[in-house]
Each structure stands twice: as C-alpha cells, then as structure tokens.
Image (cartoon, coloured by chain):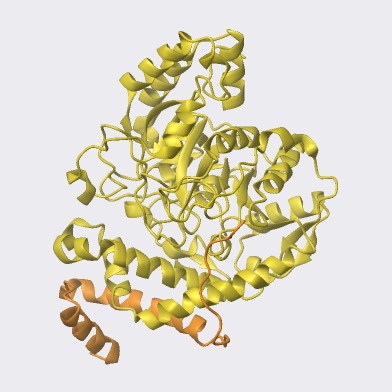
Chain colours: A orange, B yellow
Amino acid sequence: MADKLDDFITAASAALDLPLQEAWRPAIKANLEVTLKLANLVAEFPLPDEAEPAPIYKA
Amino acid sequence: MTDDTTWSTASEIAQAVASGKISAGAVTDTALKTIDARNPALNAFIAVTAERARAKAKAIDADPAAKKLPLAGVPFAVKNLFDVEGIATVAGSKINRAHPPARRDAELIERLEKAGAVLVGALNMGEYAYDFTGENVHDGPSRNPHDQTRMSGGSSGGSGSAVGGGLVPLALGSDTNGSIRVPSSLCGIFGLKPTYGRLTRARSFPFVASLDHLGPFARSTRDLALSYDAMQGFDAVDAACVDQPVAPVTPVLEQGLDGLRIAVAGGYFRKGASPEALAALDGIAKTLKASPVEIPEAARARAAAYVITCTEGAALHLERLRTQANDFDPAVRDRLLAAAMVPATLVVKAQNFRRWYREKVLELFKDCDVILAPATPVTAPKLGQQTFTLDGVEVPLRPNMGIYTQPISFIGLPVAAVPVPLDPLPIGLQIIAAPWREDIALRVAYALEKMGAVKATRPKL
C-alpha cells in the first residue's frame, strides 16, 4: 500500500527528472528509509548555530 | 632471497635489485607469470600492462642510478579508478568503458615509478567504489586468496586479492569509508589510509570528494612506509590536498613503542564485533597494555558519513542516473537514486556534525597517541552472502562491513590496518593516530610485526 514515502518518491522522481521503474521502487524505498533514518539521527543532535563544516585539516 | 619473488616484500626486491642479486626484468617476468597463473582463480586484475612493465624494467636494469631507487624493480598494480595512460579508467563500471583511454598516469603512479616501481596492471573493484564486498556485476568478484569462495572485501577488492595472493607486493587503492581497511582485513594484509588531504588524488576517478583518500596495500609495514614516502608531497591539482611538509616515515619505523600512549576503543567499537574480531583486538590491546577509551557519538558519525557518501555520490552520478540508469549495477543505482532525493538540509547537518565530532575526537589525542579498533566486524564472508548477524540482529552485509571504519575516515584520521593471523581466516585491526601522524600509526604497526603479533600469512595457492 502506498504511504507518504511512496508519494514522496513518485513526486521527487518527477520533479527532479529521475528515472523510476516500478521494479526498482522497493529497493529505492528501502534505501531511502535507511538514509533518512540515519540523516535524522544526525539532525536531531543539538549543535550551536556557529557549527559550520570544516572538513580539511590545516597544518 | 631466492629467485621466487612471489612472496618477497617490496623492500627485499629493491635491495636485491640494488645489489645486483636479481634484475628488475626478472622480477617483472615473475610477477607477470604469477598474474597469468593465479588471476583466473582470483580475478584481481582487469588489465595487465605487460609491455609497459617490461620496458620500464629494462630501463631500470640499464641505469645504475635507477637500480638504487627505494622501490627499484618493485611490481605494483592499481585499483582501476587510477588513470593509467592508454587504458580507460572504468572505476568498476560498465558506463566508463566508453571513456577514451587516459592520456596520463595518475600522479601517485608517476611518483611510485619515479621511485623505481614498475606498474603491471589495473585491478578489479566494486562499481564506482560504492561497495564493501569486492563483488562486481560486470567483471565478476575478486576472490579472497585464503579461500576463493569468500569475499576479498571492497571496494579495493582487487588490490587486497592481488597483494594477499602474492601477485604483486604493492598495490594502490582508495578509501572513502573503509575501502582500503576492509580488504586489508579480509585478505590478511597491511594497508595505509593516510590523513585526509595528505596524498594527492590527481587523475583518479572520484566518489565522495569530502571523504576520498588514496593509499597503499602491502605485506609489510616497511613496504607501506617506503611507498607512502615516495607518494607524499603537495599537489595543487587536488583541491583537498594540503600543503604539508613531507615527513618521511621509513627512517623512524624502528623507534619502537617507547613513549607512546596506546588506547583501545570500547563501546560502539565492540558492539556487534564477532568473537574473532574481539579476540584479535583484545590480544593486541593486551600486548600493548592499551587503556580503554570511548570515541563519542561514533554511531552518529557513521550515520553522517553514510549520508554524505550517498548524496555526494548521487551528485557525482546524477546525469548518468538520468540517462544510463540501466547500465549501473542495480544495487548501486537504487542506493544512488534514493540518495538523489535526500533533502540538502540533512546533508548540511551531517557536514556540520562532522566539525563537532572532529573536535571531540581530537581531544582524545591529548591523552593518547594511538587508538586501536577492529577493522571489520567479521572475517571474510562467503561470496554472494547478503546478510550477517551484527549484535544479534540480521542486517544487510554490504553497507555494514564498514561500521568500524566509517567513523574514522569521516574525520580523515590516518590509519594503519594490520592483519592478525587467525586460523583459518585473518582479520584486521585499525591503528588510528592523530592527523598527520602516520609515522606513529606505522611505528606501532612495525613494532607489532616485529613481535610477530601481526603478519601477512601466505595463502596456499
């Protein structure tokens, strides 16, 4: 049964011009569920407004 | 040294060439014959540059100065995401086979050859480096030299298989989330993932710009050091390469453990580890009298690395996803398509978290010099295996082989992966140091190797 994530995948594929075949949908959905779960685990961690990316070590 | 150089180290080969005991040509011929004999079983190589290798070896043998170079006559091979002049850089994909042949070698190949090494070919890898298994739907899997029914580990699977199987003493690979450390662990060899920004990535095919590292595989710590020393040095072509003074490690390898404070990661880094991984970790920790340390928020760090990886990967491949979706490995395609839909706000949050986490982990290095951790939760799984048990729960294997490596490369810390020779299959440990302290990680690896606690075991091939 379609749920909100199915609706999102359908809409995002159309809006972003991404190919979507129905056979791929279960795997795409499973991957998106995992990625959003992990992304939210990070996003819920409180950080100060000043926390900005700085990926490279300077000597 | 005998004429059989198939299990010789790079250091032994270079010394033998320098002293005239053996010619670079003979070493190259042995390597090419060994590749011919063993590659049908291991599937580590996807291209062999025999003609080029013989010409290079001949040039070394004709030049007395070249024979004294630190890697004189040492055969090496590279993951096929490094540009090799005259060969298309396929990066494990079907799509890139349409690319024209590379016009110039990757910078690190040029630096190794300048030090006397001899390129003999390009190695199998997971498609676009998005893989921890060493399997490849287009080329077939590279196989584990200790048990050919098992995985080599990914994504630098061919590099692990070729070095662990005695096809070459030295190989290069890349590591975004563990792709040097995972194959090192599964194939029972040594690997070095240097500090992010240390080695240039010029003329290699990228995956995740924020996290991509290049580095060597070998069967001894000294060989890692020799090759790493030959590859150091700033290169403005790679935007992430840092103008850091060259710091040769080979001269300090034998300084030993005196004065080094050694810690072992607990918590997250024990949860889910198999009995083999814990036995290896605890044995080495006891040998080194390591003190326990907790790396804070490692699970969240791994989650953030996962998000940055899939979304930067999706950005890299966006046009190919739109136009050539059916030409991808379906598993890679479905991960990247899902990632292309992840809101940008969540990706920025992951990058912001990276800064916080980096500062917290760097604080740990005020009280220790290295941190030990497992490299993989398990020894080499069976080829085709889809799931494994982690902390009592059955989970997909492919994304979870890197649970212990991802929180470390996420902030670019240098790591030496060392093989603990368990029977029947080896398993690796990570020796993690502070940024730019590859010397310390390799000193500890060297000391453990001298004690016999870590060792690349010769497989029966």
B119 lies above or below A50: above
B303 lies above or below B7: below
Residue B339: horizontal and vertical position, in percent?
32, 73
Q: Nearer the viewer, residue B221 or A4?
A: B221
Residue B185: horizontal and vertical position, in percent?
56, 48
Q: Nearer the viewer, residue B140 or B429?
A: B429
> Residue at the location (61% across, 41% down)?
B246
> Residue at the location (61% across, 21% down)?
B12
Residue B417: horizontal and vertical position, in percent?
61, 48
State left or right for residue B219 relative to residue B370: left
> Residue at the location (26% across, 76% down)?
A26
Q: How many marks?
A: 0
Q: Determine if residue B314 is in view.
A: yes
Q: Nearer the viewer, residue B21 or B460?
A: B21
Q: Nearer the viewer, residue B380 or B309?
A: B309
Q: Quadrant of the N terminus of chain B?
A: top right
Residue A28: horizontal and vertical position, in percent?
28, 74
Q: Determine if residue B144 is in view.
A: no
For residue B77, what is the image quadrant? top left
State left or right for residue B301 relative to residue A33: right
